[in-house]
Image (tube, coloured by chain):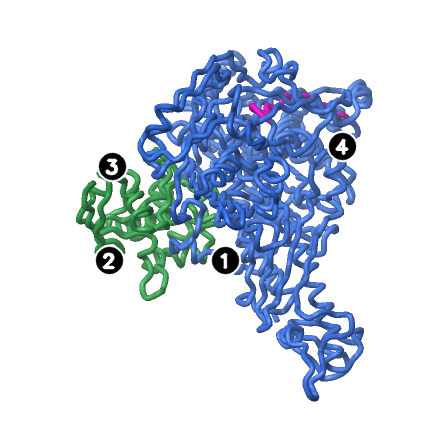
Chain colours: A blue, B green
Amino acid sequence: MASLVGSRVERKEDKRFLTGKGRYTADINLANQTYAIFVRSPHARASIKKINIDKALKSSGVVSILTGKEIADDKIGGLIAGWAIRSEDGTEMKCPGNPPLAKDNVNFVGDPVAVVIAESLAEAKEAAEKVEVDYKVLKAVTSTADAMDGDTIHEGIDKNLCFDWLLGDRQKVKEAFDKADKVISIDIINNRLIPNAMEPRACVADYNAASEEITLYTTSQNPHLSRLIMSAFGNVAPEHKLRVVAPDVGGGFGSKINVYNEDIVCSWAAKKINRAIKWVAERSESFLTDIHGRDHVTHAELAVTKDGKFLGFKNETIANLGAYARVFGTVTPTYLFGPCATGVYEIPAAYTNVKAVYTNTAPVDAYRGAGRPEATYTIERLVEKASMELGIDKTELRIKNFPTAFPFKQTLVHTVDSGDYVAGMEKAKQMADYKGFEARRRESEAKGKLRGIGVTSYFEACGIAPSAAVMSLGCGVGLWESAEVRFNPTGQVTVYTGSHSHGQSHQTTFAQIAADELGVPIENIDIVHGDTDKGTFGMGTYGSRSLAVGGIAIVNACKKIVEKGKRVTAKMLEANPEDVEFKDGEFIVSKSNKKKTIGEVAFACYLPGVRDEMKSPLPEGDEPGLKETSFYDPSNFSFPAGTHIAEVEIDPETGHVKLEKYTACDDFGRIINPMVVEGQVHGGLAQGIGQALYENAEYDETGQLMTGSYMDYTMPRADNFPEFNIGYTCTHATTNPLGVKGCGEAGAIAAPPTVMNAVIDALGGQEVTMPATAEKVWKACKNLKKSNSKAA
Amino acid sequence: MGKISLEVNGRKVEKEAPDNTLLSTFLREHLQLTGTHIGCDTSQCGACVVHVDGNSLKSCTALAADVNGSKVTTIEGLETNGKMHPMQEAFKKLHGLQCGFCTPGMVMSAIDLLQKNKKPSDTEIRDWLEGNICRCTGYQNIVAAVKEAATKM
């Protein structure tokens, strides 16, 4: 039987999406449902003096109006930070309470203060307009850089500082800098982004008064984790009385990891009014209240010798958490950021210091790449600047500092098991025709255009992660993953995974893995996820972990099936279990022609009766049935890596940046489905290039979001991109049996510095901030002209 | 309230609906054709594109009453005898979709392009699809799928 792992298998999920048969949360309607509209703060910072719902209650169709008072009275808990980070001085991070409906204070525009529930959506909207909230408006803090000097947002949290965290050794770094021939320094901003999954968040909550069960359909990347948080911290219902279903989910990119206010409020309120409640975000609500990403202000320095060896690295960053610390809010700018900030280089001494600050803006949390794009942007902009200042070719300088052997003990935390960074660089250069660039630059110049080339070599720690490691770093849960493999008596297989697909193709790639392991045709394998009542508890999908953690759990569960199958076959064929081999779906007794198919074995496991001459096929000690579970906890993170090269052409008359070529050469370890991996790379690149050239979330000084719709926030469109040129080097991970590493975030991690390095190269080394809009680039072109004419 | 009469996916429908009902709402809420998606509130994302009398239209930009008497085709109406339309097939073959949310609008829009331009260039495809936002695919495989479909339609 040909192996499916490694093949371009068309997706099992596609037909329902292509024919309108997908079932997203907003498509779900329950009998007798009501509709919720949230009343949200129009102010970035205010105290709530009074809420008057009298007029709204009289509005037509209103069923109930609930505020922060009722939710506090019912002791419903708030939203939480999932990771506890300690400051350099050993103190614990400081987190404010974050009630699902604000009672006393609001802290960002969009913070919900009340929910209006009515018979129809139109009636709910009309009544919501009549809720009168009397606010005392306070001065907002919105700037990341100045947040520590602003008014105190949360009582008792001095300087708005959640933590002041250090990773690394300041003294060693000082010594390294003392020895340096040259210090390259850089001040950069990692611009705030809005994830913008195309499906707006939504939830439908239902309550069954007889069984006292709440069912919540919601747009989540991790329904089991949502249930745990809502139960353990939200006090919504005990876990066994709360079912969370994340059906088809239209993209997440990290924005759907969090349990949100609306999930808790609708679940709680459904029980209170004893009816189903539906809420669907309008896009403007998504802009205001989905978690945002990035938003760092960084000063970094690299100590180098004159021939280009890196000696030391410092990174001083202020990270904006927004108004509240959420699930991955505190780990994103620390353990997902700091360790990767030294990049793919041997740097003997390094530290990263992060001050995480609260501001009156939407909470900032994990967005595709989460911490690693910020880290890669820091080091790769710095290395590119070093290459300019030292006059060493940008690819040579990188190669000079690559690790020479694997496992590579990276400076700050990680031990990278495998990789070949030189091979990736060489292949990328070849794919991009790096050598031919100077000729292309001259051609552009002849047309009056400026051409630049940019390089990035990156690695990322993903496949999060080993529970022992993450819990020691402050994670509130272990990040293993579960799988359950169930054979039906007639031979088809259902695989339950605790991870979740919201575009990643689990139904196909996970079925490929199970098909190979069990020798069952892929048509006979179904992958089930997204319902806490169906599968085993699992941790969900983020941090490129589905395959590297969840996929391995499937492999392990399949292996247990095969082990049982060998015992059963031995009993059925009167052989020793040790003599039974399994290959391509058949159990074969070695050195004989005796064999059983896995389908026959499954059937026998379910019908172990004894009648007349039939003997039970079950060995002593084995129970009937054929179903196995695995909880897989990896021994290490996985470490994808690669080199990307971009070329841009700038029109100095307009400042327009045209991305001419983009080459990505990535090492994701073994590839399960090249078609799916290609799609993941393309999508990540689009988001990374979006950050570099188009996207920016901007608040004004009063805390109003200036980029709150697709009219103002530039989403990359089809005509913004060239055809991407992608390739791979595949060094298998040594830490898991599939040799896989993860591919979901690479594009978003590598593309911003790659593109910006090209833009800045074209501009003769002048810094511009992301996004490199025509206005900024045009100004830089004017400066360039001035300095050129001076030089002449 | 007014009576809306349409031919949707070859079937005549008549329903009472409030006068301010958008075509997108009418399809989703009154006809339960939930394949047409709502991704924004400013007519920017294109997830709601359907065909009205053969031309693509963002169904959130029209009132159902505005298109009274028209023939409407949604993503649910593309299959013939259980066989997907060549555009749907091409999207599947070339991985032109991931989460599937923008897909119905993308497919409906792309079909209209090929009705108007049988052999579009890459640039023409990218320009035409400028009104449809996809956050997953980076568009490359969508462009490839449209080109593939052009050879089959």
Residue A774: x and y in percent read 43, 24
Q: CA distance from mark 2 to mark 3?
A: 23 Å
Residue B11, label in figure:
2
Element type at mark 2:
strand
**A244 relative to B4 in the view: left or right:** right
Seen at 71% across and 45% down, the residue is: A420
Kindly identify which residue carries mark 3: B20
- Chain letter of mark 4 equals A
- Chain letter of mark 3 equals B
Q: Are marks 1 and 3 in contact (CB under 8 Å)?
A: no
Q: Main secondary structure of the magenta part?
A: strand
- Mark 2 or mark 1: which is in front? 2
Kindly identify which residue carries mark 1: A11
Element type at mark 4:
loop
Residue, far bottom: A613
- Mark 2 or mark 4: which is in front? 2
- At label 3, the amino acid type is Asn
Task: Mark 3: give few (<14), some (14-19) or many (20+) Cα within 10 Å.
Answer: few
What's drawn in magenta, residue-wise? Answer: A311-324
Q: Are marks 1 and 4 on the same chain?
A: yes
